[in-house]
Amino acid sequence: MLVDTQNRTDDPEIMDDFDLEGDELKEALDKIASINQLLGGNQLTLRGVRKLLKKVPHLGTITIVDVGCGNGDMLRKLADFGLSANLNLDLIGVDANYFTVNYAIDLSVNYPNIKYRCEDIFSKSFNELKCDIILCTLTLHHFKNDEITKLLALFNKNSSIGFVVNDLQRSSIAYRLFQGFCIVFRLNKMSRNDGLVSILRGFKREELIAFSEELRFKKFSIQWKWAFRYQWIVEKF
């Protein structure tokens, strides 16, 4: 059966339910983190951060916000990077699910420079959250196009250095490969369902360019990377 990837799907993901909790969610969060690590997703985001930091002439405390932080694996990787690079990083994870945030807190007890906030990113409090860099890894595809436009405008307004989006390419090949991936790695029902829907909610390159042009980003780069990802960096300098 052919997979229709012409337009983004509006089908929901199980994890879009912010009241979701329990062992199945915890397992799904860990699987997402493991797969992202295995396929180089965390490194892709980290390279984006390093590129942005090269543009800053004098590094003091750098505040980085991770939107849709999940179990906090990206923030812990950033904290380790900051320590090795002798950088003073203030890291903030934002997620709308209390269970997810509490799980991330438990996993990050040895990282004093990581804080977590449970809030809706369309809330007034998030709208007022200023920082240097915003990260959005495998999160943007959860939103509809009009919501994405609002979020990107907010990212651009509230970040002093820029932001990094790491998200999926909408591709029939990626869809079929992930079906095989599910079998090999014995993913649970939630991970299987949400992974396939995520791909169909992913992006084409021309769509990301259109967002950039609509919002008049002055300097941005969009690069395709392995595992059917796009690294989208918007620089404020």
Image (spheres, rainbow, N blue to C red):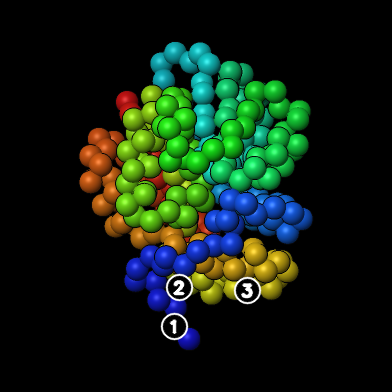
Residue 129 in percent (x, y) is at 46, 27
Where does the image place residue 27, in percent across and percent down from the top left?
73, 56
For the residues labelled 1 and 2, say whether their Cβ atoms are less than 8 Å apart.
Answer: yes
Which type of secondary structure does the marked residue at label 3 adopt?
A: helix
Q: Are marks 3 and 2 in contact (CB under 8 Å)?
A: no
Marks 3 and 2, the one that precedes in the sequence: 2
Mark 2 residue type: Ser
Which corner quadrant holds the C terminus?
A: top left
Left or right, residue 50 beside residue 214: right
Q: Residue sitting at 69 percent across and 52 percent down?
A: 21
Q: Amino acid at mark 3?
A: Gly
Looking at the picture, does residue 182 appear above or below residue 18? Answer: below
SS assignment at label 1 = loop
The local crowd at label 2, few if under 14, some if 14 to 19, many if 20 or more residues have their Cα within 10 Å, is some
Residue appearing at x 43%, y 60% in the figure: 202
Q: Which residue is mark 2?
A: 172
- Image: 187 above or below 50: below
Q: Which residue is most to the bottom?
A: 1
Q: Can you see residue 158? A: yes
Q: Distance between the Cα atoms at labels 1 and 2?
A: 8 Å
Tag 2 secondary structure: helix
Query: Percent x, y for residue 122?
Result: 43, 41
- Label 3 and label 1: CA atoms lie apart by 16 Å
Mark 1 or mark 2: which comes first in sequence?
1
Q: Indicate the quadrant where residue 78 lies.
A: top right
How many marks do you count on the picture?
Answer: 3
Q: Which mark is residue 180?
A: 3
Relative to residue 106, is residue 147 drawn left or right? left
Residue drawn at (56%, 43%) of the image: 96
